[in-house]
């Protein structure tokens, strides 16, 4: 795989919507949550998961994790956390695309229509960039969803 040193060929797309295989399932990713709301036909008041490339980027974005939970959050895999009604993930796995590597964070959601499963034709019409490897795009189970605070971890999904 050739890794470009810049994303200049995507310079005309300010905040692209990306279709990519995540560590859990196929997902839409963008730094513009309004575009994702439009694609998914969901109210703008319903929040999206914010995915960070690493834990230090998460902390630099003025986020806090209860001290007793920091180690757990840093080491967890395929897990989404909710702290004070903010959902986030730390995706420390190797990111497959230079476009995604250059973003410190992005909003993420599953790649499907509301209450339907993954359909490639629908997704291709809605995105600016498709990132696909030799394994293709396939729907898997979603991430574990935990609500955490100083004392408790409660599994939501």
Image: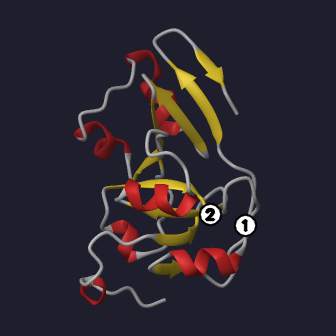
Q: Position of residue 115 (x, y in %)?
A: 73, 53
Look at the numbered discs 1 and 2 and tell me whether their residues touch, using CB distance below 8 Å.
yes
32 vs 136: above or below: above
Q: Position of residue 83 (x, y in %)?
A: 45, 25
Number of residue marks: 2
Residue 134 seen: yes
Residue found at x 65% / y 45%: 143
Q: Is the residue marked by circle 1 packed among few (<14), some (14-19), or many (20+) residues within 10 Å?
A: some
Which is nearer the eye, 116 or 77? 116
Residue found at x 37% / y 72%: 16
The image's mark for residue 103 is none
Residue found at x 52% / y 29%: 72
> Dividing the picture into quarters, in which one does residue 64 lie?
top left
Taking the image as shown, residue 103 lies to the left or right of residue 95, namely left
Q: Marks 1 and 2, how far apart in space? A: 6 Å
Q: Residue furthest top?
A: 151
101 vs 116: above or below: below
146 vs 150: above or below: below
Residue 132 seen: no
> Dividing the picture into quarters, in which one does residue 17 lie?
bottom left
Please give the residue where the numbered disc 2 appears in the rendered image: 111
For label 2, the SS is loop
**Of the image marks 1 and 2, the number of the one nearer the N terminus:** 2
Q: Position of residue 26 (x, y in %)?
A: 64, 65
For label 1, the SS is loop
Please give the residue where the numbered disc 1 appears in the rendered image: 118
């Amino acid at each position: 795989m050739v890794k470009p040193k810049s994303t200049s060929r995507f310079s005309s797309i300010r905040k692209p919507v990306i279709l990519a295989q995540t560590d859990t399932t196929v997902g839409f990713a963008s730094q513009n949550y309004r575009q994702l709301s439009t694609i998914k036909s969901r109210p703008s008041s319903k929040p999206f998961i914010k995915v960070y490339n690493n834990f230090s980027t998460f902390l630099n974005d003025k986020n806090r994790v209860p001290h007793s939970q920091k180690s757990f959050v840093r080491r967890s895999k395929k897990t989404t956390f909710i702290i004070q009604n903010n959902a986030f993930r730390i995706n420390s796995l190797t990111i497959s695309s230079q476009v995604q590597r250059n973003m410190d964070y992005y909003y993420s959601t599953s790649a499907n229509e509301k209450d339907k499963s993954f359909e490639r034709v629908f997704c291709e019409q809605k995105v600016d960039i498709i990132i696909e490897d030799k394994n293709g795009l396939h729907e898997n189970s979603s991430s574990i969803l935990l609500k955490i605070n100083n004392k408790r971890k409660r599994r939501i999904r």
